[in-house]
Each structure stands twice: as C-alpha cells, then as structure tokens.
Image (cartoon, rainbow, N blue to C red):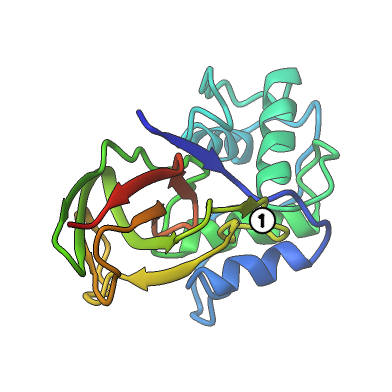
Amino acid sequence: MNSYKMMSKVSFGILSLLALIALGAPLSTHAQQPYLSNSLSFGSTGTSVTKLQTFLAADQHVYPLGLTTGYYGALTEQAVKQFQLYYGIDPVGNVGPITLAAINNVAASAHPLDVTSPSAYKVSTNATSNSVTLNWPTGENTYSKVFYAQSPILTTEANANFTAPGISGSVVTDTTSIATPSHNITIGGLLSRTTYYYVTESSDNAGNTTISLPATLTTL
C-alpha cells in the first residue's frame, strides 16, 4: 500500500468536543437518553461498564481484545486512555465528565467510533500534453484531493484533532463532494513535457486522513 497515515496530535480538555462538532457530530439537542449516564473508573462494575466496553471495542485500535466483562480493569482503563488520546482528552484512564460527554457525542452522532485511517491503494495516471487524470481506490468511502507542484511536495504534521496534514502545492478537490471508494480527479492547465510532483489525500467521514507517498508524472 503506497500510503502513510497521519492523525493529528492531541490537544487537551474541552477542545476535543469542538473537534467532534467540526466533524459533523454536534452535541445532541434531542431529549434522548445518553449512551452512558454516569462516570466510571477502575474497579467499577455493572451494565454501564459493559456498555463502555462494547463502545470501545467498536475499534480494535482502541480496545484490541474487546472483552465485555462488566468489570473496569486494567484493559478497560488502557482502552479508555487510548480513546482519550485519539480524541484529545487528558489520558487519565477514568471516564469523567469530559470523556463521558465525548463518548455520548460520538455514540449519538451519525459516525460511530472511528480512529482508523482509510486504506488508499495504487494511483494510476493518464496524462496528455496539458492535463492528467488520476485514479485510485480506497478501502472505505472517502473524500479526495490531489496536491501537485513542479517542485517536491512538502508535508507537515497536523496540529489539531482530526485535521488533515499540511501539504504544499496547488490542490484540486473532487468536485462531487461525495464520499466514495473510487476516486477520479483531473488536473488541467499543465505545461507540456513537464514533470510534476503530486500526492493524493483521502479522508473518511470521521476525519481520519491518509496521504499517498509523493510521486511524479510527466505530461506529453
């Protein structure tokens, strides 16, 4: 797989909830029961712990073993810390008010727990004298962009939760604005017999982003 995956570094506290809102997962205004209604910590037991473990097990990167025992032990504590790291919360391992709000926000949103970057596969190119069309598939529905330039592409790591890395060059965005597993983007206005550097970017509905390794193409 010719891609590497970037997820942003954490920022702590309530800013994580703002990041979730930016992802289209607003805090619920409906009179509905929250997924979890009470704080939890090491040693807690009962159905609330089972629900927490079920929630965390939705992504193996957060809770690899996925045990739903109803007991808040070391494995659950570590999974909570992983969730907190991904969502920009101080990784204390307890489900306090901030973590509880984040869990309920994710559970109530249209997007399930998802901290896994999408898989992006080999890019094929079809160049003419002044344009090129790039095609590539992804392992899930994603939004796509292509960055290109006549000089090598530079990337910088993202500095906020669930945001894309910084990428140099000009950008062309998929005009359909629909998440799809098949991507087709045409870049026009290129110079003939010229080498261009490019990378593709694929982002899923949860904001996890994958960019391809920098590559080159040459127009006719």
Q: Tell me which residue sits at (49%, 51%) in the image.
A: 208
Query: Which residue is identified by label 1?
Result: 158
3 to 19, vertically: above or below: above
Q: Nearer the viewer, residue 202 or 125?
A: 125
Residue 118, given in percent of the width and then of the height, sits at 39, 43
Amino acid type at circle 1 is Ala
161 displayed left or right of 153? right
**Which quadrant is the C terminus positioned in?**
bottom left
Q: Is residue 89 visible?
A: yes
* Mark 1: few/some/many CA within 10 Å (<14, 14-19, 20+): some
193 displayed left or right of 161? left
Q: Tell me which residue sits at (48%, 40%) in the image.
A: 116
129 to 45, vertically: above or below: below
Q: Is residue 200 visible?
A: no
Circle 1: element type: loop
Residue 109, given in percent of the width and then of the height, sits at 45, 65
Q: Nearer the viewer, residue 152 or 205?
A: 152
Q: Tell me which residue sits at (49%, 47%) in the image.
A: 113
